[in-house]
Image (cartoon, rainbow, N blue to C red):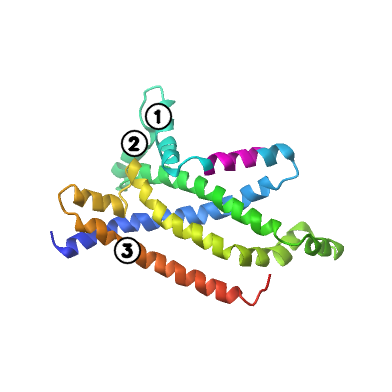
Amino acid sequence: MSFMVVTQSLLEGFALTCLLFIVTLVLSLPLGLLISFCTMSKVKPIKYASKVFVWIIRGVPLMLQLFIVYYLPGMFSKTGVNFWGVLDKTLYFKYGIECGGPLIAAAIAFIINYACYFSEIFRGGIEGIPKGQIEAGQVLGMTKGQIFSKIILMQVIKRIVAPMSNEIITLVKDTALARVIGVIEIIKVADLFASKALLWPLFYTGAFYLIFVGALTLLFGYIEKKLSYYKV
């Protein structure tokens, strides 16, 4: 099989990898911020329920969470039919979308998982702000929203860039786990080639990840440099 044919197939798989990455990142960041506010809430039921939820999600392997999201709905179905499988066929026959069901299931699992990790990073960044700055904002008559946007936000962003970049780079590599529920991402495509005794595409996938992670590393380095003027 020619190099160009393999590359084209891997690029198609990598497109799904990138899609899963982008959807997860865009939705898990705001959800993570919301969860962090819940874990810091003064309302004890909300605070402790959120902390327990984060503890469970962080303590259970992501692969198991993928299985739970994908297979659990079918266990409660009277017919025993997998919901995501039905959705997958519907999306394919109506709109020509392949792997739609598994991809949505994977996205849900990834979003919940990473939102919990991001929430801890957000919480650490927010709680690291000296209380005196918040009290100063209150003395000046600022609302909670103004204190957060004008005093806390930029300092939090500065503090969390490094740990957040590590989690985001980990997310890039974790997307490979989506193949266990049938998402045809780049590693799954390489596995299909390997099943035909063509092993080199499996190693070739490393180049795609290295380029993607390299680009993200440069991006985060640029962001850190731009924020370096803001001392915390």
Q: Which residue is mark 3?
A: 208
Q: Amino acid at mark 2?
A: Gly
Q: Report the amino acid beneath label 3.
A: Phe
Residue at 35% across / 28% down in the picture?
81
| Magenta stretch: includes residue 57 | yes
Pick whichever of labels 2 and 1 is earlier in the sequence.
Answer: 1
Identity, as a three-letter code, of the amino acid under mark 1: Gly
- Classified by dominant secondary structure, the portion drawn in magenta counts as helix
Separation of residues labelled 2 and 1 (CA atoms): 9 Å
Horizontal side of residue 97 vs 112, given as left or right: left
Q: Which residue is mark 1?
A: 74
Q: Which residue is painted at 45% across and 54% down in the image? A: 23
Does dot 1 land on a helix, a strand or a loop?
A: helix
Q: Secondary structure at mark 3?
A: helix
- Observer-nearest of 94 and 92: 92
Q: Quadrant of the C terminus?
A: bottom right
Task: Name above or below for residue 3 compared with residue 118.
Answer: below
Question: What secondary structure is marked by label 2?
Answer: helix
- Mark 1, residues whose alpha carbon is within 10 Å: few (<14), some, or many (≥20)? some
**In-front residue for pair 232/79:** 232
Q: Residue 69: image x %, image y %?
A: 44, 37
The residue to which callout 2 is attached is: 85
Q: Is residue 142 visible?
A: no
Query: In percent of the image, x 78 and y 64: which residue is there?
Result: 133
Q: Earlier in the sequence, mark 3 or mark 1?
A: 1
Q: CA distance from mark 3 to mark 1?
A: 35 Å
Rendered view: 22 above or below 85: below
Marks 2 and 1 close (CB-CB < 8 Å)? yes
Start and end of the magenta stretch?
49-58
Q: Give coordinates of residue 186: x percent, y percent.
A: 30, 55
